[in-house]
Image (cartoon, rainbow, N blue to C red):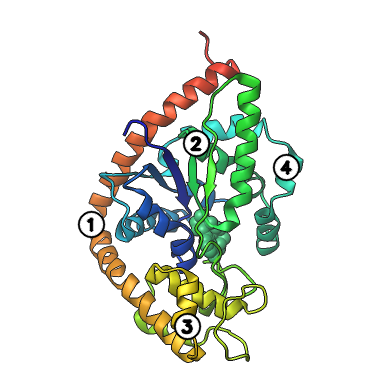
């Protein structure tokens, strides 16, 4: 719609979606749909920075699309598509790679973390991942990028590239800004609350998946690491485990963390864990149900993906035409 700000965000189809992805990003994606022009993407091209099996990735990409729909992304309101279906992402990626300094990429903390986790496969794609992410955002002239705290550094690099390109070639891209939620911007591991919750954690007790069965959600929260103080307080630095549970509870109930602290004042960790489990189960049960329905009709999912890619291409092609002209790639 005319005059509305444009939003872009993406999620990797790397297996399941955790409660961290849900609270840090997805929940906001859904809430923003009425007030912004939203473009949401399953970023399968980012996924191949780590080893993938083609048939598994193909299935996971469509499953991720179904999960986004089940969470509440509405294709009538927002553009929803799979990244590799729009080749313009790769086209802009290359142009931006040639404008990015090696030193800038060497500073990216996600690259450093992932290089440790995937030491046998430190490929160039893992290193240039943030440039592809910048291309994803700038391609659509997005002004806002709803992400978790861990992606802030990548959006900052996108802003630097946007400024650099616009300065050299004249106004080409809209300047994007990260949109980071007040509560749950960094959901922590349930087992090591000093570390970010991550869907590729080898210990499945460290994370909750949106599609987990209620008894698994209950069990994982019951086992969540807290501390021996026995007092419910919000202090992420010194009381990471309890603070994490309070953030999860608050996000699930849509209330500020301070309100949750009041609600649990005088109660024990057992009550906090049980109530958090109840809130998470209530929130995810209908999503699981819708997901099952949606994945039973893969033809329909493919039509939604194709339709989304067509809409995305219309915007992306305009940006690429502009960029290619400025770079001297056209003959006009
Ligand atoms: N723990 C988290 N808390 C809040 N937000 C988070 N996000 C990720 N983890 C948390 C946000 O989720 C969105 C999608 O993330 P992604 O799938 O593109 O990749 P990621 O950030 O690499 O997520 P993971 O779970 O950590 O995946 P793996 O284990 O594969 O590396 C992003 O907006 C992100 O900020």
Q: Position of residue 163 (x, y in %)?
A: 63, 31
Mark 1 or mark 4: name the one nearer the start of the chain: 4
Q: Which residue is mark 2?
A: 89
Of residues 152 and 302, which is closer to you in this image?
152
Vertical arrangement, residue 177 with respect to residue 70, above or below: above
- Residue 288 appears in which quarter of the rendering? bottom left
Q: Residue drawn at (46%, 68%), measured in percent from left and top?
A: 256
Mark 4 or mark 3: name the one nearer the start of the chain: 4
Q: Residue drawn at (53%, 39%), measured in percent from left and top?
A: 176
Q: Which mark is residue 130?
A: none
Mark 2 or mark 1: name the one nearer the start of the chain: 2
Q: Which residue is mark 3?
A: 221
Q: Which residue is mark 4?
A: 104
Marks 1 & 4, CB-CB < 8 Å contact: no
Q: Position of residue 238 (x, y in %)?
A: 67, 77
Mark 3 or mark 1: name the one nearer the start of the chain: 3
Mark 2 or mark 4: name the one nearer the start of the chain: 2
Distance between the alpha carbons at the discs numbered 1 and 4: 44 Å
Q: Nearer the viewer, mark 3 or mark 1?
A: 3
Q: Nearer the viewer, mark 1 or mark 4?
A: 4
- Residue 150 appears in which quarter of the rendering? bottom right
Vertical arrangement, residue 292 with respect to residue 181, above or below: below
Mark 3 or mark 2: name the one nearer the start of the chain: 2
Badge 3 element: helix
Vertical arrangement, residue 155 with respect to residue 90, above or below: below
Q: Which mark is residue 297?
A: 1
Q: Residue drawn at (51%, 39%), measured in percent from left and top?
A: 137
């Amino acid at each position: 719609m005319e005059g509305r700000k444009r939003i872009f965000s993406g999620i990797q189809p790397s297996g399941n979606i955790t409660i961290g992805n849900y609270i840090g990003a997805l929940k906001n994606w859904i809430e923003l749909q009425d007030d912004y022009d939203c473009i949401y993407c399953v970023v399968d091209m980012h996924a191949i920075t780590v080893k993938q099996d083609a048939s598994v990735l193909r299935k996971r990409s469509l499953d991720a699309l179904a999960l986004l729909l089940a969470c509440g992304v509405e294709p009538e309101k927002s553009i929803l598509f799979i990244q590799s279906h729009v080749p313009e992402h790769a086209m802009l990626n290359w142009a931006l790679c040639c404008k990015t300094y090696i030193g800038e990429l060497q500073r990216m903390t996600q690259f450093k973390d992932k290089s440790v986790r995937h030491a046998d496969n430190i490929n160039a794609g893992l290193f240039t991942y943030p440039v592809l992410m910048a291309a994803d955002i700038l391609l659509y002239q997005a002004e806002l990028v709803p992400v978790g705290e861990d992606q802030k550094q990548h959006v900052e690099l996108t802003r630097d590239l946007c400024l650099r390109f616009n300065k050299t070639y004249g106004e080409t891209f809209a300047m994007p800004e990260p949109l980071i939620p007040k509560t749950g911007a960094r959901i922590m591991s349930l087992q090591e609350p000093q570390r970010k919750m991550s869907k590729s954690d080898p210990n499945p007790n460290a994370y909750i998946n949106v599609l987990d069965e209620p008894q698994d959600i209950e069990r994982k929260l019951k086992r969540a690491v807290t501390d021996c103080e026995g007092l419910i307080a919000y202090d992420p630095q010194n009381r990471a485990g309890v603070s994490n549970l309070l953030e999860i509870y608050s996000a699930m109930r849509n209330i500020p963390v301070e309100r949750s602290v009041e609600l649990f004042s005088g109660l024990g960790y057992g009550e906090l864990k049980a109530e958090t489990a109840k809130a998470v189960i209530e929130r995810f049960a209908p999503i699981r149900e819708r997901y099952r329905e949606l994945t039973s009709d893969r033809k329909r999912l493919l039509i939604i993906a194709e339709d989304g890619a067509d809409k995305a291409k219309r915007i992306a092609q305009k940006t690429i035409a502009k960029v290619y002209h400025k770079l001297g790639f056209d003959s006009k």
